[in-house]
Amino acid sequence: MTTNPRRTAAVTGAASGIGRALAAHLSEHDYDVTLADIDRDGVEAVADTIGGHRSVTLDVSDAGAMERFADDIGPVDLLCLNAGVLGASMGPPWEAAPAEWDRVLGVNLHGVVNGLRSFVPRLLQDQRSHGILITASLAGTLTWPGGGAYAASKHAVLAVAEQAAIHLADSPISVTVTCPTLVRTAMSDVGDDPADVAALALDAVASETFAVVSPGWSEALRARAEMLTTGCRPETPLPDAEAS
């Protein structure tokens, strides 16, 4: 009698926050999870806590390191490109220093692109169904006066996720992007429970839903679309919210 092999998953940014919650949820649902994070001690501790899964120290902004990571673990059933950082400045974009722009874009945007570049060809060659979950932010769907480099990076991540979904529409690979509001992570002391955010995102992956955005922000999204289509100058700030 043969048994089906356990499903496999990889989660970047798994040492804390949403990444930790994703890894824990997947472990509870019988996935063999590889946890990756630049924080070696943190990711090892999480891997041990959730059931002795494998952990890897990984800088997602390093294209070569991501390529070696993909070579090592192969075409996982679910790839969670979740790693993200805030900048020191969350004000207008010109206040963020060049080094801050480089770091935030390197992790938040290039980390996603590096993950897609390294894994998608392997997933396509595998010719099985696979899922890709990308963590963006509400700050990538709407625009506030501040947000520094973080907001711009998440707008770019949303665009990359949409590009990937369109390109892979006729393949067995589904793409989901989650755009949470404030989440209680290392980035914020207040907000939604990361476990709830992770569960909602993984439900969307299972149903092959593309975008997960809080329904409470639907009207603001429609207003932004109207502003862009009419060419009106943005004048009225959106309701108070911070980057997730």
Image (cartoon, rainbow, N blue to C red):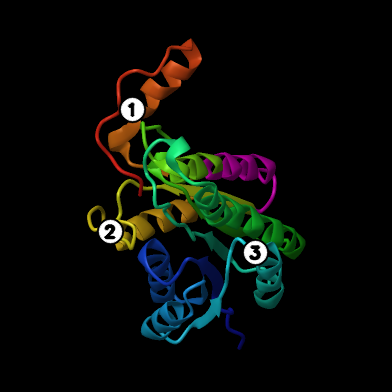
Q: Amino acid at mark 2?
A: Arg
Looking at the image, which residue is at 39% across and 19% down?
234
The numbered dot on residue 38 is none
Mark 1 / mark 2, whichever is N-terminal = 2
Mark 1 / mark 3, whichever is N-terminal = 3
Given contact means CB atoms under 8 Å apart, are the residues at marks 3 and 2 in contact? no
Q: Identify the residue position indicated by label 2 in the image.
A: 184
Q: Amino acid at mark 1?
A: Ala
Local SS, label 3: loop
Question: Crowdedness of circle 3 by 10 Å Cα count: few (<14), some, many (20+)?
Answer: some
The numbered dot on residue 62 is 3
Residue 211 visible at all? no
Q: Position of residue 243 (x, y in %)?
A: 35, 45
Q: Identify the residue position indicated by label 1 in the image.
A: 220
State the predominant SS element of the stretch in magenta. helix
Q: Nearer the viewer, residue 25 or 111?
A: 111
Q: Nearer the viewer, residue 186 or 182?
A: 186
Look at the picture and state if 23 lies above or below 200. Answer: below
Looking at the image, which residue is at 43% across and 71% down?
23
Q: CA distance from mark 3 to mark 2?
A: 27 Å
Given contact means CB atoms under 8 Å apart, are the residues at marks 1 and 2 in contact? no
Quarter of the image for residue 115 reads bottom right
Local SS, label 1: helix
Magenta span: 157-172
Which is closer to the viewer, label 3 or label 2? 3
Looking at the image, which residue is at 31% across and 34% down?
217
